[in-house]
């Protein structure tokens, strides 16, 4: 990584295809907004980032334990959807921070 400490690189996997992404800390409100901007996903994040609809599901590679911490409405929404895998998160609840660096983020199309 360059001397620019705000730079974040990660990989998005969609339909088996990997796309590298480079961004900066807080360039996007959250991961859902970034994914919609980069991948043009239909019906992704229907509640607009409130953590209530479970239409922005992603699976993280799980390298960083802090990324599996669920906040706000996320825990209840995932439980209501029957999701127990800690690697599955709502993209709208993941801020764009250095913890995402080198992460593999898989978009779960079944939920969209």
Image: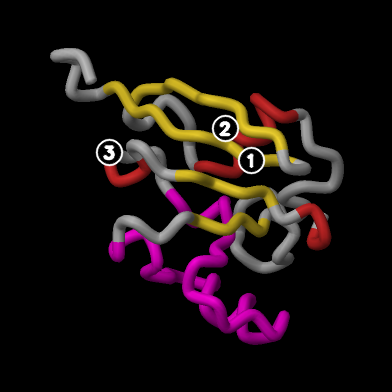
Residue 23 sits above or below residue 112 on the image: above
Left or right of 6 in this view: 78:
right
How far apart are the two marked residues, 2 and 3, measured between alpha carbons? 15 Å
Judged from the image, the secondary structure of the residue bearing numbered disc 3 is helix
Q: Is residue 55 above or below residue 23?
A: below
| Sequence-first tag of 2 and 1 | 1
85 within the magenta span: yes
Range of the magenta residues? 65-94
Q: In terms of image quadrants, where is residue 82?
A: bottom right
Q: x, y (%) of residue 79?
A: 62, 85
Does residue 91 show up magenta in the picture? yes
Residue assigned mark 2: 34
**Occupied quadrant, residue 73:** bottom right
In the picture provided, is 14 more to the left or to the right than 33? right
Query: In the rendered structure, are the residues bearing label 1 and label 3 in contact, judged by CB atoms less than 8 Å apart?
Result: no
Q: Earlier in the sequence, mark 1 or mark 3?
A: 1
- Residue 29 image point, x, y percent: 48, 37
Please rate how many residues cluster around mark 3, counting C-alpha atoms within 10 Å: few if below 14, some from 14 to 19, many from 20.
some
Disc ID at residue 106: none
Q: Is residue 53 above or below residue 13?
A: below
The residue wearing badge 3 is 98
Q: Nearer the viewer, mark 1 or mark 3?
A: 1
As measured in the structure, the alpha-carbon distance from the residue carrying label 1 to the one carrying label 3 is 19 Å
Disc 1 residue crowd, few under 14, some 14–19, many 20+, Cα 10 Å: some
User: Could you say which is closer to the camera, residue 34 or residue 72?
Assistant: 34
- Residue 3 rendering spot, x and y as whole percentages: 14, 14
Q: CA distance from mark 2 to mark 1?
A: 14 Å
Q: Which residue is mark 1?
A: 13
Q: Write the residue at 30% across / 65% down.
A: 65
Residue at 70% of width from left, 34% of height from top? 17
Asked if marks 2 and 1 touch (Cβ < 8 Å), the reply is no
């Amino acid at each position: 990584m360059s001397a620019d400490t705000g730079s974040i690189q990660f990989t998005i996997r969609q339909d088996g295809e990997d796309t590298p992404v480079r961004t900066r800390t807080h360039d996007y409100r959250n991961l859902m907004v970034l994914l919609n901007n980069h991948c043009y996903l239909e019906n992704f994040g229907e509640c607009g980032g409130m953590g209530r609809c479970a239409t922005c599901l992603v699976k993280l590679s799980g390298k960083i334990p802090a990324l599996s911490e669920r906040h706000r409405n996320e825990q209840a929404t995932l439980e209501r959807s029957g999701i127990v895998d800690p690697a599955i998160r709502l993209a709208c609840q993941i801020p764009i921070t250095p913890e995402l660096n080198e992460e593999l983020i898989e978009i779960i199309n079944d939920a969209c």
